[in-house]
Amino acid sequence: MYKRSNMVIGIVFVLLGVLFLLRNLNIFNVFDMFDFGNIIANMWPTLFLLIPSFIMHLSYFSGRNRDAGILVPGGILLGVGVTCQLSMFFDIWGVMWPGFIMAVAIGLFELYLFGTRDRGLLIPVTILGGLSIIFFTTISFRELFGFGINKLILPLVLILLGVAIMIKNDRKDKEF
């Protein structure tokens, strides 16, 4: 019994020594996984935005709260939480900012889907969602290809649109 407990203590010391050595050589830091400050610094969107959003959604879909209005802040928190968490993980704040606009569209669209189906809600949903998609697309093209929409994409779209109109007009003239 005495020798077995010494063996366990020895193994624990060896493992701790290896972990400290790896940390000191900047190879692997297992201790960061248990650092509460590090967890809060990297996971705050999940803790303070996504979890409350899931609680709001759970309260509505479980039947505890029958008011679909709870889905508006729940959807907004969901959109903002996903935007912030992705930005934290990949350091892409400059690309993800249209997600904040989309978050409001998500909340209002959930109210439309699960609420009274008031068609008036689709107006701000369409405007906000469309703006967000335009901004995401513009920023994504600029980040991926190194140029903005004004340099190449917009002229190409205008050229293609003009050609399509001319071809369509030419076909109508031949029909008559």
Image (cartoon, rainbow, N blue to C red):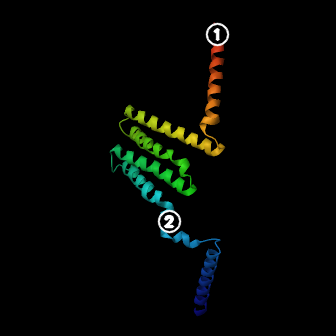
Image quarter for residue 142?
Answer: top right
Please tell me the numbered disc located at residue 39.
2
Callout 1 secondary element: helix
Image quarter for residue 67?
Answer: top left
Please tell me the numbered disc located at residue 173.
1
Which residue is the extreme one toward the bottom?
2
Q: Position of residue 104 (x, y in %)?
A: 43, 43
Q: Position of residue 66 (x, y in %)?
A: 33, 46
Is disc 1 surrounded by few (<14), some (14 to 19) or many (20+) residues within 10 Å?
few
Callout 2 secondary element: helix
Is 144 situated above or below 23? above
Left or right: 121 in relation to 87: left
Left or right: 121 in relation to 26: left
Is 61 situated above or below 119? below
What residue is shown at x 49% (from left), y 53% (from top)?
Answer: 84
Is disc 2 surrounded by few (<14), some (14 to 19) or many (20+) residues within 10 Å?
few
Looking at the rendered structure, the kind of residue marked 2 is Ile
What residue is shown at x 63% (from left), y 15% (from top)?
Answer: 169
Is 170 situated above or below 66? above
Viewer-side residue, 31 vs 143: 143
